[in-house]
Amino acid sequence: MSRFILFVAALLLVACGGQSVAPPKVSDGNATHPLEGKVAGLERTLVARYHHVNEFKDGEGHKQKEANYRGISYRPRQSEFRGYKGWDVLETPWSDSYNADWLHLTLNRDATVVVVWESGASWLNGWQKGQTSLTENNRIKEFTSYTKNFSKGEVVLGGPGKDKGRYTVLIAEKDGTASHEPPLPDKIDERPEANATCPSWLHNAYRATGPDSQEYKSWHPQIDPVYWCYFGHEHGSDPSLVGYSAKLNYTATQNSSQAEQHQGFKGFAIRDEEQGLGWYINVHATTSDIARACVQFHTVVVAVTDLGTGELLAELSYKGDFGGLVANRKDKNGEIPFINHHQCPEQKPADAGTRPVKRIRVANESSIENNDYERWFGGITKELGMNFKGDFGIEIDIRNPGTSCNTFACTGDHVNDSQGDRRTIRLKRIQIKHDPFKDADGDGVFYTNPYGTAPASEGDEGATRQYIKPGLEITSPDAFFATQDAWRARYTDEHRVPGLELESSLSFN
Amino acid sequence: MKRLLVLVTVVLLSACGSAPSGGAGNSDTDSSSVASLSSLPTPEAFSMAKGETKTLSVTVTRKDVALARLELSTQVGPLGVTISPSSYMVTFEEGGPDTQTVEFSVSVEPSVSNPKPDFYIYGKALDERGRSIGSGTLRLKYQWSL
């Protein structure tokens, strides 16, 4: 009987438009920082992450919630408000939303939070009311302040509502004192400035040891979580979400020290909880440089971990085949035009069985429009012990590529003024199987050329280390993955793909 | 089978070798309709030894009055190479000079392990409202052997 009542209640809720709407999946905590535990007194900023919730109806009239980062800016120790000088500032965007669940910010430790506004809202009931002002261009502007103490963790604030202006959030330590500037490591005197480009030394601090025991640059977030400076580019998922550490440039180094643009490494971390497997796939898929059009083989890393034990099960590094080049849209005759690149007209899949292809936007051809996704299909090398179901192994879609080919001859680029940050991935049941014939000594390690297509011996020039745990035979999900998390970018089986740029900080992608 | 693998490898490697490697290729300057970028030493002449520090002068020339700022940004591939500053905003005033030079300090640590270090200097052209203008990102690619 009670089940029946619950069922009817659920039906009524749906009928009345009160269907529950899943919140954006953006709660993956903090990424690690390379200087934590190495520099005395080092503390993260008070705010760890933020987003606001954009609620809207999709094409079928269903309510949807999406994480949104536009218009939010966190500026540590930069408040000029009277009585709050040097507090952290979180600027929020204009919004018509009256929702109580609108702005989410996560505090790294207990803090005092002040909302400064010319207006007010019911969600501020119970906050301590006061006054403050801001002097700009010799004019004094008065504001109401609303103060409340919060514990470490997530704080949810309401929307400002229509025509009520923006509010600003000020944050200080729990005793009301401004946060302290973080110390520098020994022998470093170049201080990272908050909200400016990070110095090289900090970028270099994010590193990992490669399969050849050399150190390589590794994943870092868009914004350094201690100094709050900008790296100016992003690498997609934090590989530690699946217990992995990325060694960017390892494959390129084995490939005759190929100069690969650092910002081009884009990762996808997927937790397959059903099978207890963590997948991390990294493809060198920059779209800011049209030179990609004439490059058939792009660096791919596929790593798989045991989510229960953290054990690395497979780590394959190679130049993956993404095949020939075609336009991303059909022309008026329903045909997909080839891009007959002026420098490399002969691009075609190395192995016809894998059917790889790159579909790129073309800007200045009257038969097609310069829009829609850039799509990369392929990236699987069967000689490594990999396989897949269907026509391709990996599909990466880039919804806002930074550049397009100018024409079908691709003699130059067209800049789209987009960041290439709205990426999705589809896996087609990728299989990885240990092959004892490749791994003579049975330790799972074998060496190949940088393409993964031919065996090599350790120490040979270009010998690239591969690892598949002896006896391993696994298959990835056959699914589409996207992310709404700008901070660590875990890919999940959802379909919302918001822009992930934080504070307009992505200069090059 | 082994012969076939070797053959495939040779074909793949030669196919790759005939195509640009994803960068711009070495060039002394990079130019667009709105600006040009050049440097001393030039990318082709650039060379450093382990432990050395060198000053790199990058010259920006405005070719279109709509260019208000050129955002210079550095990107280094391997560990062991540092460039300071990491970025620089070149601003063009109305009636001001069309050519400006910025200096970067490049250091190669003694411990660098990559035998062919590389870095890029990018220039992004912006109008006075901060919007991208012109076609493409200006780019100088430096790579040398230690």
Image: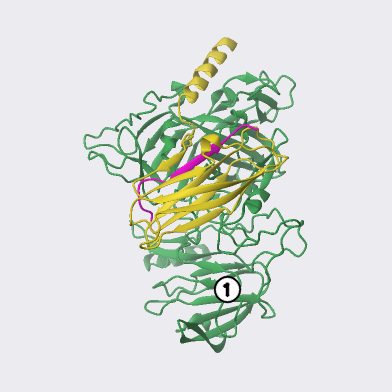
Chain colours: A green, B yellow
Q: Is residue B79 left or right of residue A321?
A: right
Image x and y of residue B116, in percent: 61, 33
> Residue at (67%, 30%) from the top-left corner?
A467
Image x and y of residue A360, in percent: 37, 38
The kind of residue tagged 1 is Gln
Mark 1 falls within which chain? A
> Residue at (52%, 38%) from the top-left corner?
B43
Q: Is residue A200 left or right of residue B29?
A: right
Mark count:
1
Main SS of residues in magenta: loop
Q: Which quadrant of the view contains residue A63?
A: bottom left
Residue located beneath label 1 in the image: A78
Nearer to me, A286 or A53 = A286
> What residue range appears in magenta?
B132-146
> Residue at (63%, 35%) from the top-left corner?
A250
Please indicate, yes or no, whether residue A146 appears anywhere in the rendered image. Answer: yes
